[in-house]
Image: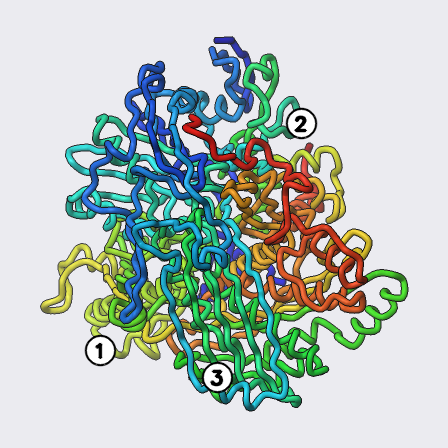
């Protein structure tokens, strides 16, 4: 447990649990989020969205809306004139990815419920919604395909007739020899693991405000990567990117869903230019659930081979990946992340992962917290415990038997990826200092005797983050059409105050605080004197943003390097003024002094003063004290850890109660341990949410059944316990800070721990495997089936029926195809 | 249009509003107090929680006209950066927020609980905050913050 220290002076700011710089404005209601931005003459934009999962647009009658009070314009896809469609950034060498053209507003057909068809712009927030009700779209329904496996069958309805197949691509990564894997195995365990569709669901919905002045666009946007958005929009509007400024102010959570470039911001900017007024669009939650990217949605066919002594001989997974109808920025690429970590923490000689992407009549999937790695951990760690049960071995012993050893790092796994550093036994050992497993098993036996089904599940996880070495993931490598360096500026003002600019775009991670700690140490400033800026393309060089747990390992390292460049110049100025050699100047306790004479020295402010009033600088030195860095890492980083979850399952109702959750994580040395704990807490609950509560569900007609927070159950404070967190620190050799990244760790780890715990709890009842979400009905039904009693299908499962049980949602029932029915 | 006379954070306002105007939009759009947030359409998330005559309410579920003659307190009325309310201070000290979007509602809900029950148990805090959703913190530090404020004695 971290204790917050309130420190005003320190020799070393890194490592301290400092209170956040972001907080004073946020706890007093003075944060500035996009929806808070108001401009004179601003119009509101409301979207008209498809109520059909697949249909031809017969006609759009907007006459009533156009004449409604305060309405300035109604536009459809036919009106919108852009230079390019919305981007998808993955072009893998040697793999054909079938890509439909993605437009901000539908033209001709709609292919998922929630697809934007038209927009209304007007002067009143309520008025535009009224007017939107007066836009009548006539649809001619087409056949719908919702189940990705059915979509791959011959004769399935096609989502994109012109593409001719619903399979988007097939991508494989592997190493070793799978025939040998099965030949060497004493047992082969196979499971079909459904990793269902979820929503990122930040509490702040998406929003934008677009304004043109003098041919320049300023766009306030809820974005995790404003620089990329600027570049894309320059393409769409056929102007150079210097004519566009994108500002991501305070952003109310992202979890990946604010990475992509969405049509709404393009339409808002286009309409703002056409109408000569600023335009604001703010997503409703219902829009968020239907038209902001979803995550996960893999059906993983997994096969593990093992010897009786627990040696794993091979792991193969074919993932059927439901990508939805259109791509957002990284849609087909996300399952690759499952492949990159398919070896988990283990020495597995033979590995193969295949992703088969599938079009369905649904919203796109893309990156949400963990992006492919939660799916990997889930399938690996669930299979570890399934395999252990199969060969009658303790699941922790099975793990230990196969762990990559500390001394083996840097460790190349069979698929050719090199893990930077790790100590998997170390984190499990530490976890078991918090969890007395023998005592737990005794308690478990006693409780079972009283009809209480308690279970424990583990997840020894690892991940790949710190995106990324551009040479590896760029166009000629994995095939992303970008570099993945990060940019920084460290500017010392004449007073000694420090502005640190980062190309990242945080949205809750606390980088204003942790980055200030890094810079303060390196330039000899006080934490309070360092102001961190980000999220504004007008403020500094091109940056790649915040996702993939990259901000610290890439952005933080970039800032550290810029700060060291500044310190180096400061040393040369100090040396000149103190009449010493630059190599004899050392920075300690906030002072640049001559080695051996700590009393003879200069503060950063004194040096900055000399740098900006350049009367006496070294010969040939430029005035000023400011440096820019672009940093491209040599490798990814590989955080890891060990989690344990203890649950009680009510065998009568199937309800799960998370009794205890303990984690030991390793993301390298802590910059601010308080922030790390916070990331783990939130991440773990995100994974618990998927395991127990959350599911995006479309019915067989492609209607979204879980379109609000009434039907899509985010965990509340009453659904989860407090957490016990601990850490080990294994530095990464990749960067000078030794840091790895922690934003996604909890989510990557936790769904497997919860699932394994629930299975452990109900195993005495004859249930040996369960898919998520572990709803009361799913568990109850499994218990009934294990007892040989027929149980009704679980509405939360594929093949189950919501119609039998009622979904609780209003107005989102199946839409029967009808002749020319207006809606 | 209808008239509404309401006191918000100690300042009296007389506004002409549409009868259907939600209190949250009166607060945000008419009065310009943007600390109160909107996160859903169904009164689930609690980001818009304010105090109406001393009771925590979700201001997306109250019509502005219903507040005629009432007193409303929003997050801006709880304390300023120079003079923080103990609960605000506790959220800061305990890292009870990350993106900050749910935070105003959480603080208002927490203050409502402590006004009614100055020394709640952890379970009581969790139950009281169940109508306020947070996606960042996993609630751990929010609960800790409320308990910390309680232990120091929050003025009602």
Q: Are marks 1 and 2 on the same chain?
A: no
Q: Are marks 1 and 2 in contact (CB under 8 Å)?
A: no
Q: Is residue A293 above or below residue A1?
A: above
Give the structural element (helix, strand or loop) at label 3: helix
Could one spot residue A605 in this view of the protein? no
Pointer 3 local density, CA inside 10 Å: few below 14, some 14–19, many at least 20: some
Query: Label 1 lies in what chain?
Result: A
Q: Give the number of the disc on residue A11.
A: none
Where is residue A55 drawn, in percent x and y?
39, 38
Could one spot residue A390 in this view of the protein? yes
Q: Is residue B102 above or below residue A333?
A: above
Where is residue A45 drawn, in percent x and y?
35, 29
Whole-number angstrom distance, CA of label 3 to CA of label 2: 65 Å
Where is residue A617 drawn, in percent x and y?
15, 64
Residue at 53% across, 51% down:
B136
Q: Give the number of the disc on residue A581.
A: 1
Comes first in the chain, label 3 or label 1? 3
Residue position for label 3: A178
Query: Label 2 lies in what chain?
Result: B
Whole-number angstrom distance, CA of label 3 to CA of label 1: 62 Å
Residue at 40% across, 58% down:
A547
Residue at 22% across, 70% down:
A572
For discs 3 and 1, the disc positioned in front in the rendered view:
3
Where is residue A698 drawn, in percent x and y?
53, 45
Q: Are marks 3 and 1 in contact (CB under 8 Å)?
A: no
Residue position for label 2: B55
For discs 3 and 2, the disc positioned in front in the rendered view:
3
Residue A823: image quadrant is top left
Whole-number angstrom distance, CA of label 1 to CA of label 2: 68 Å
Give the structural element (helix, strand or loop) at label 1: loop
């Amino acid at each position: 447990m971290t204790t917050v220290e309130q420190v005003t002076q320190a020799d070393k700011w890194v490592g301290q649990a400092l209170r956040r710089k972001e907080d004073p404005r946020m706890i007093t209601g003075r944060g500035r989020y996009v929806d808070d931005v108001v401009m004179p003459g601003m119009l509101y934009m409301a979207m008209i969205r498809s109520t059909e999962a697949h249909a031809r647009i017969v006609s759009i009658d907007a006459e009533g809306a156009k004449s409604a009070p305060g309405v300035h314009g109604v536009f459809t896809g036919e009106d919108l004139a852009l230079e390019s469609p919305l981007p998808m950034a993955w072009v893998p060498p040697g793999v054909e990815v079938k890509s439909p053209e993605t437009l901000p507003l539908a033209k001709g057909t709609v292919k998922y419920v929630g697809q934007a068809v038209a927009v209304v712009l007007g002067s009143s927030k309520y008025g535009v919604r009224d007017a939107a009700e007066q836009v009548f779209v006539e649809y001619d329904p087409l056949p719908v395909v919702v189940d990705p496996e059915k979509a791959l069958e011959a004769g399935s309805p096609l989502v994109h007739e012109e593409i001719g197949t619903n399979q988007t691509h097939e991508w494989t990564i592997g190493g070793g020899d799978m025939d040998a894997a099965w030949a060497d195995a004493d047992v082969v365990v196979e499971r079909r693991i459904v990793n269902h569709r979820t929503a990122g669901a930040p509490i702040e919905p998406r929003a934008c405000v677009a304004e043109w002045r003098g041919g320049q666009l300023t766009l306030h946007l809820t974005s995790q990567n404003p620089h990329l958005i600027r570049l894309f929009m320059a393409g769409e509007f056929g102007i150079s990117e210097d004519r566009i400024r994108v500002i991501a102010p305070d952003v109310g959570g992202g979890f990946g869903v604010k990475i992509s470039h969405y049509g709404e911001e393009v339409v808002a900017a286009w309409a703002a230019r056409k109408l000569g007024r600023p335009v604001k669009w703010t997503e409703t939650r219902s829009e968020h659930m239907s038209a902001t990217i979803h995550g996960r949605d893999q059906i993983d066919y997994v096969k593990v081979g093992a010897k009786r002594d627990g040696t794993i001989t091979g792991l193969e997974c074919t993932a059927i990946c439901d990508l939805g109808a259109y791509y957002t920025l990284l849609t087909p690429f996300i399952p690759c992340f499952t492949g990159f970590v398919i070896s988990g923490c283990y020495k597995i000689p033979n590995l193969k992962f295949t992703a088969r992407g599938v079009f369905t009549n649904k919203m796109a999937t893309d990156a949400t917290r963990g992006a492919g790695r939660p799916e990997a951990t889930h399938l690996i760690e669930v299979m570890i415990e399934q395999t252990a049960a199969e060969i009658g071995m303790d699941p922790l012993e099975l793990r230990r038997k196969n762990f990559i050893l500390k001394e083996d790092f840097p460790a190349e796994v069979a698929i050719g990826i090199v893990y930077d550093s790790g100590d998997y036994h170390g984190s499990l050992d530490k976890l078991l200092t918090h969890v007395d497993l023998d005592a737990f098993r005794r308690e478990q036996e006693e409780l079972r005797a009283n009809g209480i089904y308690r279970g424990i599940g583990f997840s020894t996880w690892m991940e790949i983050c710190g995106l990324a070495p551009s040479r590896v993931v760029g166009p000629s490598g994995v095939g992303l059409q970008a570099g993945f360096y990060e940019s920084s500026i460290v500017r010392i003002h004449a007073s000694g105050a420090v502005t640190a600019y980062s190309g990242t775009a945080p949205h809750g991670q606390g980088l204003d605080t942790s980055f200030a700690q890094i810079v303060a140490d390196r330039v000899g400033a006080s934490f309070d004197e360092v102001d961190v800026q980000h999220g504004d393309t007008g403020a500094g060089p091109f940056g790649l943003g915040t996702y993939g747990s990259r901000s610290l390992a890439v952005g933080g390292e970039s800032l550290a390097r810029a700060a060291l460049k500044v310190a180096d110049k400061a040393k040369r100025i100090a040396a000149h003024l103190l009449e010493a050699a630059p190599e004899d100047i050392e920075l300690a306790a906030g002072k640049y002094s001559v080695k051996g004479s700590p009393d003879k020295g200069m503060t950063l402010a004194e040096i900055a003063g000399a740098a900006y009033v350049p009367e006496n600088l070294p010969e040939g030195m430029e005035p000023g004290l400011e440096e820019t860095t672009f940093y491209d890492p040599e490798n990814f980083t590989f955080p890891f850890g060990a989690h344990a979850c203890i649950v009680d399952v009510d065998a009568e109702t199937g309800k799960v109660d998370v009794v205890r959750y303990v984690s030991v994580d390793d993301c390298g040395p802590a910059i601010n341990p308080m922030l790390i704990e916070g990331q783990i807490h939130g991440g773990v609950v995100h994974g618990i949410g998927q395991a127990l509560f959350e599911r995006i569900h479309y019915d067989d007609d492609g209607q979204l059944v879980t379109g609000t927070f009434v039907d899509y159950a985010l965990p509340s404070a009453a659904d989860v316990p407090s957490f016990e967190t601990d850490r080990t620190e294994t530095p990464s050799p990749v960067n000078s800070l030794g840091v790895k990244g922690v934003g996604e760790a909890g989510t990557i780890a936790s769904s497997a721990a919860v699932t394994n715990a629930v299975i452990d709890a109900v195993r005495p009842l004859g249930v040996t495997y369960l898919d998520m979400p572990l709803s009361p009905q799913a568990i109850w039904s499994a218990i009934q089936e294990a007892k040989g009693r027929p149980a009704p299908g679980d509405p939360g499962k594929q093949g189950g029926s919501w119609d039998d049980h009622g979904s609780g949602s209003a107005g989102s029932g199946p839409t029967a195809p009808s002749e020319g029915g207006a809606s | 249009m209808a008239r509404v006379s309401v006191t918000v954070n100690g300042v009296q306002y007389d506004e002409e509003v549409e009868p259907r105007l939600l209190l949250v939009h009166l607060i945000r759009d008419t009065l310009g107090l943007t600390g109160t947030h909107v996160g859903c359409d169904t009164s689930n998330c609690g980001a818009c929680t304010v105090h109406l005559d001393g009771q925590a309410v979700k201001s997306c579920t109250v019509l502005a006209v219903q507040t005629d003659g009432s007193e409303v307190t929003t997050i801006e009325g709880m304390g300023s950066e120079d003079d923080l309310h103990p609960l605000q201070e506790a959220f800061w000290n305990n890292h009870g927020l990350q993106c900050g979007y749910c935070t105003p509602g959480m603080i208002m809900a927490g203050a409502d609980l402590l006004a009614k029950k100055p020394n709640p148990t952890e379970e009581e805090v969790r139950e009281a905050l169940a109508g306020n959703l947070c996606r960042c913190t996993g609630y751990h530090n929010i609960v800790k913050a409320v308990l910390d404020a309680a232990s120091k004695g929050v003025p009602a």
